[in-house]
Amino acid sequence: MKIAIAQINSTVGDLDKNTEKIILFIANAKKAGADIVVFPELAITGYPPEDLVLKTQFVTDNLSCLEKIVKKSCDIAVYIGFVDRVKDDLFNAAAFIVEKKIKKIYHKINLPNYSVFDEKRYFKEGETPSLVTYKGVKIGLGICEDVWVNKSPYLKASKSGAKLMLNINASPYHIGKIKERGKILSALARKTKSYIVYVNMIGGQDELVFDGGSMVFGPKGNLFASASQYKEEMVVIDLEKKEKINPWLDHPSEIYGALVLGTKDYVEKNGFSDILIGLSGGIDSALTLVIAVDALGKEHVHPVFMPSQYTTDQSYTDSKILCENLEVEMLEISIKDVFDSYLKKLNPQFKGKPQNIAEENLQARIRGNYLMALSNKFGWLVLTTGNKSEMSTGYCTLYGDMSGGFAVIKDVPKTMVYELARWINSVQFAVYSLQKRKRVIPQSIIKRAPTAELAPNQKDQDTLPPYDVLDKIMKAYVEENKCRGEVCDLSGIDEKTVKHVIGMIDYSEYKRRQSPPGPRITPRAFGKDWRLPITNGYRQR
Amino acid sequence: MKIAIAQINSTVGDLDKNTEKIILFIANAKKAGADIVVFPELAITGYPPEDLVLKTQFVTDNLSCLEKIVKKSCDIAVYIGFVDRVKDDLFNAAAFIVEKKIKKIYHKINLPNYSVFDEKRYFKEGETPSLVTYKGVKIGLGICEDVWVNKSPYLKASKSGAKLMLNINASPYHIGKIKERGKILSALARKTKSYIVYVNMIGGQDELVFDGGSMVFGPKGNLFASASQYKEEMVVIDLEKKEKINPWLDHPSEIYGALVLGTKDYVEKNGFSDILIGLSGGIDSALTLVIAVDALGKEHVHPVFMPSQYTTDQSYTDSKILCENLEVEMLEISIKDVFDSYLKKLNPQFKGKPQNIAEENLQARIRGNYLMALSNKFGWLVLTTGNKSEMSTGYCTLYGDMSGGFAVIKDVPKTMVYELARWINSVQFAVYSLQKRKRVIPQSIIKRAPTAELAPNQKDQDTLPPYDVLDKIMKAYVEENKCRGEVCDLSGIDEKTVKHVIGMIDYSEYKRRQSPPGPRITPRAFGKDWRLPITNGYRQR
């Protein structure tokens, strides 16, 4: 039996475009001689459709798209995800279509309602595992979570004699997730002595990145075939033959791939062609710039250097070289005069008060205003450059460096920013458009001590603990949800420092709530899987 | 039997403060001779604790608070909400405590997971209805949602002979909600031929306002006793006597009460004493100022008038009179010089391009920067002044007038802003601190045509349809989740206008995502109950 894995990039809500794409993939699968073509979970609506599914008309429209697809399914079976409606109940569903007829509809039994998932907000749980017989083969049907649970419906399908399991997914990326999937699938294939065809979505959707990497496991738990990561593609496999296996991307290239795809899709799916980035001479904006150039092409990327009286020559030189290396034009607008103008107008109120965060934030906000003014004038999207260590501790300015539509490295801790920068400089190629270019990021950007340059001789480490210390605490507290004692034990860091960092994290919730979305690359980002109250009196004793 | 309704204002996460308060209310209830004192749902943790309950230590701490409370429950029974843990499962629970012992723990059976609620993210569903016998009376126990469902556990309790039902709540306010509650409770009291004691929380928590208004219904479905709205208080009722009934607040005073309490609690629970408001001479900032003065007292409120070349004399005079009426000092800082300074620096990029939204937004952003600079200098919180009609259509500036910590009238449509302003001017008193003051808002503010004053002779209605039209469309589309055809039918407004407004609403998601929270007063606000993707290709055909 020949199976086509249609690893497509749906756009949430764009039913017509998704349907066209699906019909095209069906035609191509037919041409390739496949018996079945398998699409991702909720391929018609995109994932996650969120409150769109609460619109009656939206569900109706998705059902008429399914009808259109059914009509195109001549000479090939199709397994595809959609939103089903039975009376007033909605289901995360999949249709098995044969010869222009829906042979079976499966309703997802196990609805994830944790982390970034809210499926119980929308869907009713399905009740019965599904099985179809097609061309003499018994096939077990399921969706996503169904392979992750102990009481997997595939076990029941296996008992009924199924030798092939179809599992469709919209499984968001985080570091190492593909290996986790592989383990689970291998074990289930062995347990059910069947082929498991795991089809994942690819593409960026707001904060989520679907990394693709669809795969097929054989009855002995062996990886039998696989598709690329971060790439829309169709892979046709023949269960009777030995198939080619794509090796997974290494660390940190898999992270880089997620950041590039997440950025590209956010920008393009929201109708933008060009982006703006405030360039400081630091490593965060350098990394963001490389990602943007790789995602969108150098002609669409507009870095802006905005010096103040505290900006060093090195910041300027490094930024200039970086832009030359990437062949992008650097705009320059000084903030000095505008800053002076503000201070003059605020003088009646500020007179006699010591300089503080007010003057520092003002500089960041003038830069934010410049970028937004250019955005408003030219229709370019602003990308922000703050990293996860800053987002955790609130070491960033609301309406300043946080101004923008998409926060590219929002979920990347500072130590990983360095790791990615060094990796970029070491590789001969990059995932998308950057070609054979060595050391695009000047060494001095990587080597100098981090500084916001908002006050004379300022260094990040005047305010924050060293980033390797901060990131260990952040990871344990934020990503692993540990309490203070556990953080100390795990990290070996003293309680005073841990308490200080946790205090900053707790206190900064109001800033994060007003931050733009950015691609999630860790098991817990500041987005849908981080729902802490702003008004929060909890301070661990 | 004498029952004390402890309608308390818990702070989310502040376990120690909440516990102290609970112990104080227990002591007072005892003094008043009550047999039972009843506290709201999750009174120990506050509601909603959100991802705090995913912290193991937080749940442990809440359990030790319960222990403390148990020890204080001598000579009086206590029914109180907390987070229970059984092995790894968490429950939205309530304890019935008698003589320093937990006699019964009830696990909430019906977990809301729609609208603003995410209870299935955190809690496992309880399985069995609970009944206790205390002083010879059989009492049915339950939490919140349990009275709203068809298969109410109280029906089972009633069949087992319960004559008194305790129902504890954290039920957020929206317009007219108290009447809905009353209807449901009256019907259930009649059906079960029992007394229902409905205890609600009061207080603001981020976007939610708990309005109190606890009530008791008698076996014939009659309202037997009630507590105030928007007020922390204890009401002791004697089931053998005729009790006093507080009349509910009229429209629109109930809305005003919610806005004042929501604002007061956000500011104070987040540790601020003073606030800043940008005053434009328009009705939105006038209403926001009145609410702030009522919530916090005039000495804590700092309005800032920030004129530009487009600001009219009338805006100045009206603002000045408003501040005099409210006895608050008005700061004045012109944005003209700073604006000129920006235009000069941006000239190399802007030269030859027509004036557009870039120059308009820049003015709003300078004002935002002024307010944030004052905020950073003095430690005062900025309140924003945008209304729901603006938030819907995106008629507001990110990092400009949207800059601030709390958006007081974010959920108030423009037509309701007028209604509230007229009401404020007509009443002899206000809910909190404003006293016997007539016509605080100058008539000219109410009467003039709305304008952002960001361009010469600009009027809102150059860009937007009249607000009565816009608000009808917004209400049907946003609050009632209707599709385009239904909106046209319901409102009688032409399809072209409806399509235009819906287009603006859909398009503005990216702005709303970065907006500060504000008190929810309608059945659907832009907050937890509005989860639309930013990247969204759905445009209804």
Image (cartoon, coloured by chain):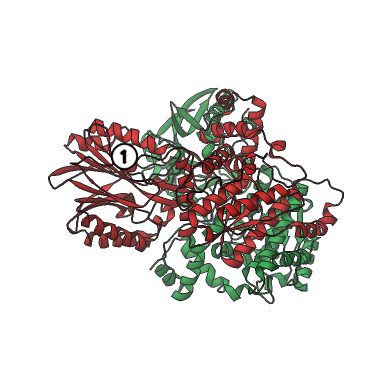
Chain colours: A green, B red
Q: In which quadrant of the rendered image does the C terminus of chain A lie?
A: bottom left
Q: Position of residue B430 (x, y in %)?
A: 47, 47
Q: Relative to B106, does residue A481 appear above or below in the rendering?
A: below
Query: In the picture provided, is B103 more to the left or to the right than A219?
Result: left
- Could one spot residue B534 in this view of the protein? yes
User: Given the current orientation, which residue lies at the most extreme left position?
Assistant: B136
Callout 1 amino acid = Asp
Q: Nearer the viewer, residue A510 or A193?
A: A510
- Quarter holding residue B216: top left
Q: Relative to A324, does residue A198 appear above or below in the rendering?
A: above
Number of residues whose C-alpha sits closer than 10 Å to that of mark 1, classed few (under 14), some (14–19) or many (20 or more): many
| Count of picture labels | 1
Q: Position of residue B404 (x, y in %)?
A: 59, 55
Q: Which residue is mark 1?
A: B146
Query: In the picture provided, is A513 more to the left or to the right than A482?
Result: right
Which chain letter matches label 1? B
Q: Position of residue A471 (x, y in %)?
A: 54, 67
- Could one spot residue A422 in this view of the protein? no
Q: Nearer the viewer, residue B431 or B221?
A: B431
Residue at left offset 48%, top offset 25%: A103
Residue at left offset 54%, top offset 31%: B476
Q: Relative to B9, does residue A498 appear above or below in the rendering?
A: below
Does dot 1 land on a helix, a strand or a loop? Answer: helix
Query: In the picture provided, is B393 more to the left or to the right than A144?
Result: right
User: Given the current orientation, which residue lies at the most extreme right position?
Assistant: B352
Q: Position of residue A410 (x, y in %)?
A: 60, 58
Q: Nearer the viewer, residue B68 or A504?
A: B68
